[in-house]
Structure formats: C-alpha cells, structure tokens
Image (cartoon, helix red, strand yellow):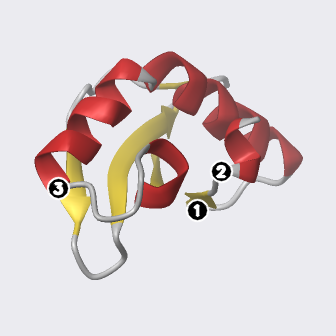
Amino acid sequence: MTLTFPDPSRRFDVARNAVDFKGYDGLFEIRFLVEAGAIAKPGTPRTLCLTAFDESRDTIQEAARRAYARGRRGFYVLTAASLR
C-alpha cells in the first residue's frame, strides 16, 4: 500500500513543541510529528505553527512519505533536515 493523508486534521502537541498529524497505509494509522522549529521561527504561537503547517502541507507530506519509505514504523518525527 501507499502512504496517504485522507484526514486533513492536525494539532499542536505542546509537550513536544510539534505539529501532530496522521497518515494511513491501508488500515494502518501512522503518526507523524513535525517539529515547530522546522516550519516556523522560534517562539511562534501555536496557531501560527498550524498555519505554517497548512501552508507547507505538500512538502511536509512528501517528507513523511520519504521517511516512511526508509523504514515502516508507527511513529516518525520530522525535523528541518527532513523537509529539505
């Protein structure tokens, strides 16, 4: 199966200072976090981090697909290096 992102929802995880979103490989749910510093400047409010995520969604999802293709796990953390 291919990793897809049919659910556009995302949330800000305060404890991890990252945006949390999900992808799916068939029936399997795969969780991703993209570090706030990878998509916004330090100190950016949560709501603006979510906006930055939305504006970069295609790039972030492509980075998620690359990470998933390297080794299939149930959880991934994407960093600034992941988005290049």
For the point 34% across and 53% down, the residue is 19
- Give the amino acid type for the residue marked by disc 2 in the picture: Ala
Tell me the SS state at disc 2: loop
The answer to which of marks 2 and 3 sits earlier in the sequence is 3
Please state which of residues 47 and 64 is positioned toward the viewer in this rendering.
47
Mark 2 in CB contact with mark 3 (< 8 angstroms): no
For the point 47% across and 43% down, the residue is 39
Q: Where is residue 16 drawn, in percent x and y?
A: 36, 77
- Mark in the foreground, 3 or 1: 3
Please state which of residues 68 and 83 is positioned toward the viewer in this rendering.
83
Quadrant for the N terminus in the image:
top right
Q: Residue furthest bottom?
A: 15
- Mark in the foreground, 2 or 3: 3
* Lateral position of residue 2 relative to residue 47, left or right: right
**Label placed on residue 80:** 2
Say which quarter of the image contains residue 6. top left
Mark 3 in CB contact with mark 1 (< 8 angstroms): no
Please state which of residues 44 and 10 is positioned toward the viewer in this rendering.
44
Tell me the SS state at disc 3: loop
In 3D space, how far apart are the residues under numbered discs 1 and 2 (Cα atoms)? Answer: 10 Å
The answer to which of marks 3 and 1 sits earlier in the sequence is 3
* Lateral position of residue 68 relative to residue 10, left or right: right
**Label placed on residue 39:** none
Say which quarter of the image contains residue 43. bottom left
For the point 43% across and 24% down, the residue is 57
Graded by Cα atoms within 10 Å as few (under 14), some (14 to 19) or many (20 or more), the crowding at tag 1 reads: some
Q: Which residue is mark 3?
A: 45
Graded by Cα atoms within 10 Å as few (under 14), some (14 to 19) or many (20 or more), the crowding at tag 2 reads: some
Graded by Cα atoms within 10 Å as few (under 14), some (14 to 19) or many (20 or more), the crowding at tag 3 reads: few
- Mark in the foreground, 1 or 2: 2
Q: Which residue is mark 1?
A: 77
